[in-house]
Image (cartoon, helix red, strand yellow):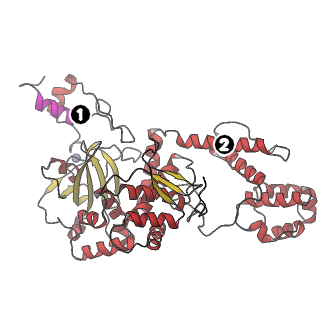
Amino acid sequence: MRHTSEQPPRPVLTVPVIPLPGEPVADAASTAPDGLTLGRRIRHFRNRQGLTLSELAGRVDSTTSQLSHVENGNREPRLSLITAIAAELGVSVAELLEPGPPPDRRAELEIALDRAQRSSLYAGLGVAPVRPGRTMPLNVLESLVALHTELARRAAEAIATPEEARRANTEIRMIMRTRDNYLPEIEELGEDLIRRAGYTSGALTHSTVSEMARTLGFEIIHVPDLPHSTRTVTDLANGRIYLPPASIPGGHGLRSLALQAIAHRVLGHTRPVSYADFLRQRLEITYFAATCLIPRSAAVDYLSERKRSRDLAIEDFRDAFGVTHEAAALRFTNLATSHLDLPLHFLRVSDDGALYKGYENDGVGLPADVHGAIEGQYVCRHWAARAAFERRTRTTEFHQYTDTPAGTFWCSTQTGRSDAGEFSITVGVPFNHAKWFRGRETARRAASGCPDESCCRRPATDLSQRWQEHSWPSAALHTQILAPLPSGTFPGVDDAEVYAFLEANAPSEGP
Ligand SMILES: [Zn+2]
């Protein structure tokens, strides 16, 4: 049954907010049709007038081949030529140029087929393209386009190799670093939408999220039987967002899921064409949800006041907006540099020391592989992100100054537990910015020599000599991390840790 009240919501943004390398930066205000749509409109009106290419070419002082290029979207015609063509075809220039869909179903399919056949996905198949001539039956055209659509869907769905995933991740992290992890276009969009839904201050309520969805033409429906492989499902035809049952009290998870589902539409996302595109969309929807859950104006007011009082603390920021510690810390990275003049770093580290997520624009040396990927790399044992696991009492943040080859940093770490085990969330700043934070008076100080392996990665020489030939560890798999862990003697195994363990547990004497 179709929803009767509203049209399916239209996207608010029509261009990617984060252009990937090599992608043209489109003008957000530009809504003119692309060359192919224009060309197909010209062909449509030419056929309606019963004119051949050469007849029209003769009348507008052009050539058959030039006009053919125009109709196939291979050449942008000058405005004078468009004006002449419009006059000959008995339509206005606006009718040719105005934004909107192609003139008819056939033209729409021809454009879709042309785009599909120009894609790198298709080129990779090595199959000769077909030209959809006027004699090609419409149902053949329909079928071809449907095949291409399915092909693209399957390619996007295919599991990316760890190498691709790491490359794409690194690429996007580098782009975000140049932007101080801040996307003002999405900030403004999110804040505008929640204000229109009635948000005034403090934490964002479920009812405001529902109201916001309604103003965008969506109804939020909680169902107990979502497909296992999904987090949410959106029915675009009927303007419905299906979410899991509202059964997680206190968490911001459901609000965030609803906002992320809305975001795909609001941000004008189309099916991702590559793994990088998929990651970019994930980042954009997560960012959008964060701008709604912790709106910029309220957050900047709050944080600026805390900075003036020299009492900045992620735990308070978290509690003020009713989100998780990780969400608060990540949101802090969006706003800290642009609005508080603070360079900083963020780490999510699992209890074995492997980095799960990281961001920095303060020069702290994140562990990275030769390609610059950080996921799965071990963080220095002496950093706060790992030292915090040694504490007994973990209800408050853990503070530490760490001297590193890149300078001294002050870090604040909170530990937590998920289904996958314990993890720590760290926000750190260079020494001279510690003065704005609660916990700056800590007496805890550590020294880190990483990435020099003699700091904490290389086993002590005597232990190596003793154990190297007498140990056989079996690596644990990190299913939640995109890539294999850096290898020791055995792939994925931390030698220093293994040898220290063996030493500590060996009966009386070692080998
Ligand atoms: Zn170290």
Q: Is residue 147 left or right of residue 223?
A: right
Q: Quadrant of residue 125?
A: top right
- Rendered view: 505 above or below 177: above
On the image, the x and y values in percent for residue 185 come to: 49, 68
Percent across and percent down for residue 146 are: 68, 43
Residue found at the very far left of the displayed protein = 508
Q: Judging from the image, what secondary structure is the residue with disc 1 in?
A: helix
Q: Foreground residue, 219 or 152?
A: 219
Residue displayed at 33% across by 58% down: 327
- Assess disc 1: are there few (<14), some (14-19) or many (≥20) residues with their C-alpha within 10 Å of its C-alpha: many
Few, some or many residues within 10 Å of mark 2 (<14, 14–19, 20+)? some
Residue beneath label 1, please?
495
Q: Is residue 129 magenta?
A: no
**At x 29% / y 43%, what residue is drawn?**
419
Q: Residue at x 24, y 24 (%)?
A: 472
Magenta range is 492-508
Q: Quadrant of residue 343?
A: bottom left
Can you identify the residue that label 2 sits on?
A: 148
By secondary structure, the bulk of the magenta-drawn segment is best described as helix
Residue lying farthest front? 1
